[in-house]
Amino acid sequence: MQSDSYERLYTALAGIPAGSVVTYGQLAALAGMPGRARWVGRVLSQLPEGSQLPWYRVINAQGRLSFPPGSAAAARQQALLSGEGVEFSASGRINLKRFGLN
């Protein structure tokens, strides 16, 4: 049963198109597990290095990256998103109405 939850999460994650973002809670709902945003975060943090899943398209509900500002991980995520055309405000936020999955 647990592997089914992971498979649904990975399938939902793989379905996020380039140039779009979702929140952890939205991804949980897309995977059929509403209310499991923290679980989604834990699972994504455990993806193996080099995973082809677009983990970087998942952000927090405030439209921000969840990595500490200025960290190498935040810089990597921002670069990947920017490379797909996702724009950040001067304060580091992403406009969820514009770039969120419709």
Image (spheres, rainbow, N blue to C red):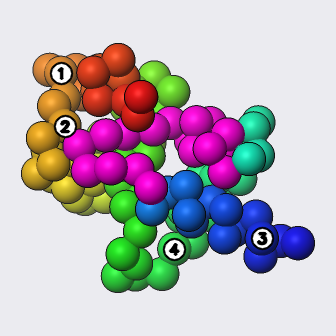
Tell me which amino acid carries mark 2: Val
Residue for badge 2: 86
Question: At x 44% / y 55%, what residue is drawn?
Answer: 15
Side of 86 where 12 appears, left or right: right
Q: Nearer the viewer, mark 2 or mark 1?
A: 2
Q: Residue 39: x percent and y percent? A: 71, 53
Identify which residue is drawn at 51% across, 74% down. 47
From the viewer's perspective, is the residue at label 2 or at label 4 nearer? 2
Name the residue that disc number 3 marks.
Answer: 4
Q: Where residue 53 sits in the image (x, y, percent)?
A: 41, 68
Horizontal arrangement in the rendering, residue 85 relative to residue 6 (left or right): left
Specify the label residue 47 is tagged with: 4
Q: Which residues make up the magenta segment?
A: 15-31
Horizontal relation, residue 57 to residue 35: left or right: left
C-alpha span from label 2 to label 4: 23 Å
Residue 89: which numbered mark, if any? 1
Q: Answer with mark 2 or mark 4, whichever residue precedes in sequence.
A: 4
Label 3 or label 2, whichever comes before in sequence order = 3
The part of the image, by quadrant, that contains residue 37 is top right
Percent across and percent down for residue 99 are 29, 29
Q: Earlier in the sequence, mark 4 or mark 1?
A: 4
Looking at the image, is 20 positioned above or below residue 44? above
Residue type highlighted by circle 1 = Ser
**Residue drawn at (44%, 46%) of the image:** 58
Residue 28 placed where, x, y %?
66, 45
Give the distance between the C-alpha atoms of the residues marked 4 and 1, in whole angstroms.
Answer: 28 Å
Marks 2/4 in contact by CB < 8 Å: the verdict is no
